[in-house]
Amino acid sequence: MLYKLLLLFCLYLPFQLALNASEGVDLASGRVFVLLLGILWLLKSLAQKKFFIPNKIQTLLLFSFLFLSAFSLVFAQNTDWAYRKLLFLLSFIPIYFVVASICHSERSEAESRNLIRSLDSLPLTRDGRDVKIIKFLVYGAGLVSLVGLFQFALQFFIGINGTFSLWQKVITPFLGNSFSQSVFQNPSWLVEISGNTYMRAIAFFPDPHMFSFYLGMLLPFAIALFWKNKSNLYLIISALILITDIFTFSRGGYLGLLAGLIFTLFIFKKELVRRFSLKKFVITNIFILIIAAIIMFPNPISQRLASSFDVSEGSNSGRLETWKQSLEVIKNNPLGVGIGNYALKIKPSANYREPIYSHNLYLDIAAETGILNALIFIWLIIVSILSFIRLGKNNKFYLAGAISLIIFSVHSIFETPLYSIHVLPLLLAIIALSIIKIKNE
């Protein structure tokens, strides 16, 4: 039952409805779902008289990150804000243990039945639970990509103003009454490119950047499933995810995908050279020509990407100024200003939902919870990437996890996704998948 509910959660993750618990309080249904999963995991563990706590460095780093985040309460000017942010992080932590426990229990069951022998892998050929979890995450990403494409295309039929107004009504049940008003007051839904205004793809996400994070992190897994199963379904899903991600017009997302592509070419360079056939040569060159055309010929996508490197561009210069501001806060407060309290350091009269942050995940963590905690978080991501690379030596499917975290890491230089109800549970699930054990295939 726990496993089936987890698969349902993976599918539901990008479609979370909000529960209006009380006036001014919006509770994401995903947080309630995770709490239910956590309770079921505890009950199952109690019934079996066995708790599975992964004995891995990822677990130690995750606990260290949470401990230092909690410790930063000492420095918080507004403890109510701090407790809310800390509770948000803690509310999604069960996902890490549930995913790790489910994948571990499958291996234990297989070993007890002698299904794993000295030269056999964890039976991935029959799609283990880890692969099923990834599949349902990818299915959800494919479905929400369709919604995002529909919403993006709608502006060419009913206009930007009509689409904007309609989507405010559509998205309110997913964001909640209070949070949606905050989003509508400071929207990042529109983008101006060469004098033309476009409404970006957002689907049911509060802003296009978090949508881009979600799609970018699952694109490598969708492509890996295509190469693993040779199914056109995964090829279509991969194309949907990529196209929709492009229409978010998130420059951080573009740079994340570019970093993921470079990393992919690097780790697969030997295979590309050894297995290069005429057919693959033609396909590769067509792909390169398409990418070159997108970059070289003037179009909204190439112009948006090019603006990423223009330091005089308004949002870029503003982001650089924000980074300098964050570095000054970190310099004066090396132990942090308290989780959730960065905005008050910048603007003492700020309200809780005012979008004041570093526009850089690592600077945000360092500013709020200390430099050491930022280094621990970076270490957690690096260790998880290296774990996927080690897993990839036996089964290249797992290299998708490393590519996913590379995309996340680079995109995080420009945005802060840690408090996203969509991205945080996805990140925890991916980190949990990095600790599984497999033997030679």
Image (cartoon, grey):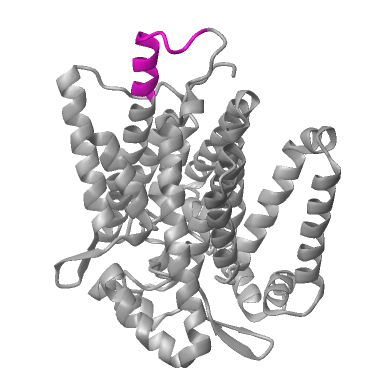
Q: On the rendered structure, is 410 left or right of 358?
A: right
The mark total stands at: 0
Q: Position of residue 65 (x, y in %)?
A: 42, 40
Q: Is residue 67 left or right of residue 177?
A: right
- Taking depth in this image into account, of 371 and 207 the one nearest to the observer is 207
Position of 135 relative to 170 (above/below): above
Q: For the point 33% across and 74% down, which residue is it? A: 171
* Magenta part, dominant SS: helix
The stretch of residues the image draws in magenta is: 104-117
Q: Quadrant of the N terminus?
A: top left
Above or below, 335 relative to 310? above
Residue depicted at 46% across the width and 27% down the height? 126
Q: State which quadrant residue 351 falls in.
A: bottom left
Is residue 158 in view?
yes
Front-lying residue, 323 or 218 = 218
- Above or below for 157 versus 231: below
In the rendered image of this protein, does residue 336 appear above or below residue 165?
above
**Residue 424, x across and y down, in percent:** 41, 50
Q: Position of residue 343 (x, y in %)?
A: 41, 67
When asked about the image quadrant of residue 175, the answer is bottom left
Q: Is residue 254 magenta?
A: no
Confirm whether residue 61 shows in the render.
Answer: no
Quadrant of the rendering where the C terminus is positioned: top right
Nearer to the camera, 153 or 176? 153
Please give the name of the residue rendered at 42% of the width and 48% of the height, measured from the top-left corner: 137
Check residue 110 for magenta coloring: yes
Q: Residue at x 77, y 58 (%)?
A: 287
Image quarter for residue 278?
top right
